[in-house]
Image: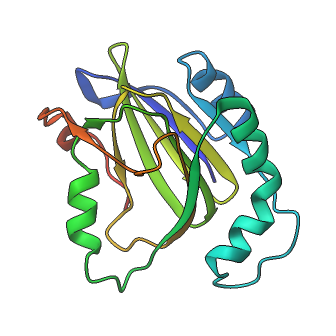
Amino acid sequence: MSALTIFSDEQPEEPIWQSTDATAIQKQLASIGVRFERWRADRALGGNPAPKAVIAAYQHEIDRLVAEKGYQSWDVISMRPDNAQRETLRQKFLSEHTHGEDEVRFFVEGAGLFCLHLEGEIFQILCEKNDLISVPADTRHWFDMGSAPNFTAIRVFDNPEGWVAHFTGDKIADAYPRLD
């Protein structure tokens, strides 16, 4: 179940606000300029779908985003618990960073935890199947895929070169809850 937990950026022990209601989550995130939507495929995908099938099932939603925001490219990424690079990648994404473009992710299956650091608060968004999140350019954030990652996501980019991170060097991510 999707969830949003908000903390002060000075008190990681005590949440300020929590919800698992998609409408409430969407409203809270919209107030800070973060897009959160629920998408549905236009066809059944079955288990472990090929990237081409994933894109085809959501092309109608991707086209809508491209028309609205001018995104230039998209792809599919899958991460499984048996990936030999999982711990290295997890550690990389757990470091607070920014991007010069929006970070747009749609979860086809599985889950991931996006943590945004802005306006004196930490917004932890547990994204699960059917969740789209768009983190605005230059927003300090980190991502936790968990110790046994198991997800497939569509990534949408402004920059055809894809994911380019600018690490802040701040260790704030170490103080907040992680994905199990």
Q: Residue at horizontal 65%, vertical 31%? A: 69
Viewer-side residue, 85 vs 116: 85
**Which of the 4 quarters of the picture holds residue 170?**
top left
Q: Residue at horizontal 25%, vertical 24%? A: 11
Instruction: Tell me which colouring the rendered structure shows.
Output: rainbow
- Residue 136 on image: x %, y %: 48, 28
* Quadrant in which the C terminus is drawn: bottom left
Count of marks placed on residues: 0
Viewer-side residue, 123 vs 76: 76
**Which of the 4 quarters of the picture holds residue 26?**
top right
- Note whether 165 is above or below 145 in the view shown: above
Q: Is residue 53 left or right of residue 76?
A: right
- Residue 67 on image: x %, y %: 75, 36
* Quadrant in which the N terminus is drawn: bottom right
Q: Residue at horizontal 17%, vertical 32%? A: 168
Q: Is residue 176 left or right of residue 105?
A: left
> Can residue 112 be seen by looking at this rendering?
yes
Q: Residue at horizontal 60%, vertical 40%? A: 71
> Can residue 21 be seen by looking at this rendering?
no
- Residue 30 on image: x %, y %: 62, 21
- Note whether 12 is above or below 125 in the view shown: above
- Residue 91 on image: x %, y %: 21, 58
- Note whether 113 is above or below 66 in the view shown: below
